[in-house]
Image (spheres, grey):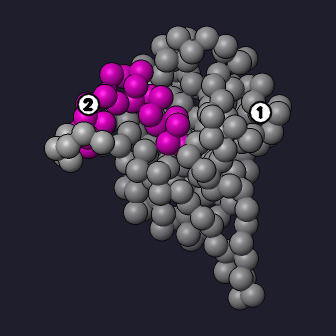
């Protein structure tokens, strides 16, 4: 399924209205930290969060479908303004179908980012399937595009900026930040 042409990837990205992320191994590096009290901890990269916020602010809807349940995921997604958070979904495909139907978004208008085998069924349905750089090799084979960054280390930002670039929105966003300094580097 992998598309080798960056032009084709950008063409797919032009039409994206919804981006869905897996969590463990995508928005985190896949490590699970458990305290003595059983509390679960996860580390999220701030640049991923900023990329997600820029994409959301540009009018693209964001969502999460993850196999595990975690209060820290709920808190992080709430802080990013992501309303469509689905946890404890071992079979992600029915949740994906329900979410897209509820939003009235066609499958070619959806991007999905995954890293492991349970992500493949959704990746096979979307307009832009992305895998993190350190995804399972089988998963990378089902991706239209693989990020240069590993999961939890900028991969989500890579996808967000790819979509923003394809939709002609990235340069204006960057200019707004660069213009704030008033001085050349």
In the figure, is residue 178 to the left or right of 141?
A: left
Disc 2 residue crowd, few under 14, some 14–19, many 20+, Cα 10 Å:
few
Q: Residue at x 40, y 25 (%)?
A: 165
Q: Is residue 47 above or below residue 107?
A: below
Magenta stretch: give its range: 156-178
Q: Residue at x 52, y 35 (%)?
A: 159
Residue 82 rendering spot, x and y as whole percentages: 42, 52
Q: Residue at x 73, y 62 (%)?
A: 31
Q: Which label's residue is closer to the chain start, 1 or 2?
A: 1
Residue 175 rendering spot, x and y as whole percentages: 25, 34
Secondary element under disc 1, as helix, strand or loop, is helix
In the figure, is residue 146 to the left or right of 84?
A: right
Count of marks, rendered view: 2
Q: Residue 7: say if magenta.
A: no
Q: Residue at x 73, y 51 (%)?
A: 90
* Residue denoted by label 2: 172
Per the picture, the main secondary structure of the magenta-coloured stretch is: helix
**Foreground mark, 1 or 2?**
2
Q: Is residue 160 above or below residue 145?
A: below
Could one spot residue 48 in this view of the protein? yes
Instruction: Assess whether mark 2 and mark 1 are in contact (beta carbons under 8 angstroms).
Output: no
Residue 139: image tag:
1
Q: Residue 175: say if magenta.
A: yes
Residue 80 rendering spot, x and y as whole percentages: 40, 57
Q: Quadrant of the N terminus?
A: top right
Secondary element under disc 2, as helix, strand or loop, is helix
- Residue 164 placement: quadrant: top left
């Amino acid at each position: 399924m992998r598309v080798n042409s960056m032009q084709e990837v950008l063409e797919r990205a032009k039409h994206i209205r919804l981006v869905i992320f897996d969590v463990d191994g995508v928005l985190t590096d896949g490590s699970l930290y458990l305290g003595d009290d059983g509390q679960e901890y996860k580390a999220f990269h701030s640049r991923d969060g900023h990329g997600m916020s820029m994409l959301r602010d540009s009018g693209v809807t964001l969502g999460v479908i993850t196999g595990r349940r975690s209060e820290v995921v709920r808190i992080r997604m709430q802080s990013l303004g992501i309303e469509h958070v689905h946890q404890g979904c071992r079979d992600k495909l029915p949740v994906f179908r329900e979410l897209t139907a509820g939003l009235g978004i066609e499958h070619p208008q959806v991007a999905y980012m995954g890293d492991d085998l349970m992500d493949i069924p959704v990746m096979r349905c979307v307009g832009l399937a992305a895998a993190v750089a350190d995804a399972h090799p089988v998963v990378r084979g089902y991706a239209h595009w693989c990020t240069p960054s590993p999961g939890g280390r900028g991969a989500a930002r890579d996808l967000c900026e790819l979509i923003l670039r394809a939709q002609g929105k990235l340069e204006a966003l960057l200019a707004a930040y660069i213009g704030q300094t008033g001085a050349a580097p």
